Image (tube, rainbow, N blue to C red):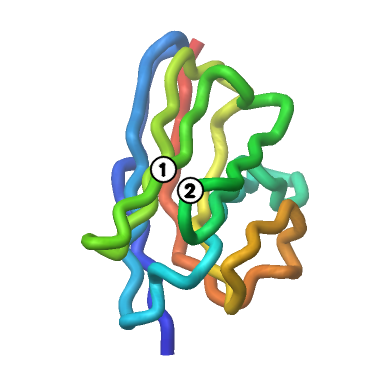
Amino acid sequence: QVQLVESGGGLVQAGGSLRLSCVTSGRTFSRRAMGWFRQAPGKEREFVAAISWNDENIYYADSVKGRFTISRDNTKNTVYLQMNSLKPEDTAVYYCAARDSAVPSLGRYDYDYWGQGTQVTVSS
């Protein structure tokens, strides 16, 4: 059983920064692709960023490219999302997700395990 626990969300003013963390249980973290998704009220869950097991393949949604950075530390079973230059439209619940594969995907249905989510609110 794989469990994911996100942290680091909160309230921030527009232009500010937050760093989300996601700790994953189990000994297979280093072989899994990881992703971040978000869901705003009344909207579908959408892709934010994804990273392969070895950092060689990283993908971002166009809406966050240049502002957000995904990274991972396989020694700590942790994936991060550094969010800079935050905008009110970034307000959402952010979810960490893991695949039973080393290859990242932009599709939410390709992920096998999900965290409970952490709220990010950006005020204008």
- As drawn, the label of residue 37 is none
Position of 120 with respect to 90 (left or right) is left
| Residue 68 coordinates in the image, percent (x, y) | 50, 27
- Verify CB contact (< 8 Å) between mark 2 and mark 1: yes
Residue beneath the point at 37% across and 50% down: 72
Disc 2 crowd rating (10 Å Cα; few below 14, some 14-19, many 20+) is few
Q: Secondary structure at mark 2?
A: loop
| Residue 10 coordinates in the image, percent (x, y) | 34, 35
Q: Quadrant of the N terminus?
A: bottom left
Q: Amino acid at mark 1?
A: Ser
- Sequence-wise, the earlier of marks 2 and 1 is 2
| Residue 113 coordinates in the image, percent (x, y) | 54, 75
Disc 1 crowd rating (10 Å Cα; few below 14, some 14-19, many 20+) is some
Residue beneath the point at 37% across and 45% down: 80
Query: Can you identify the residue that label 1 sits on?
Result: 71
Query: Can you identify the residue that label 2 sits on?
Result: 55
Q: Amino acid at mark 2?
A: Asp
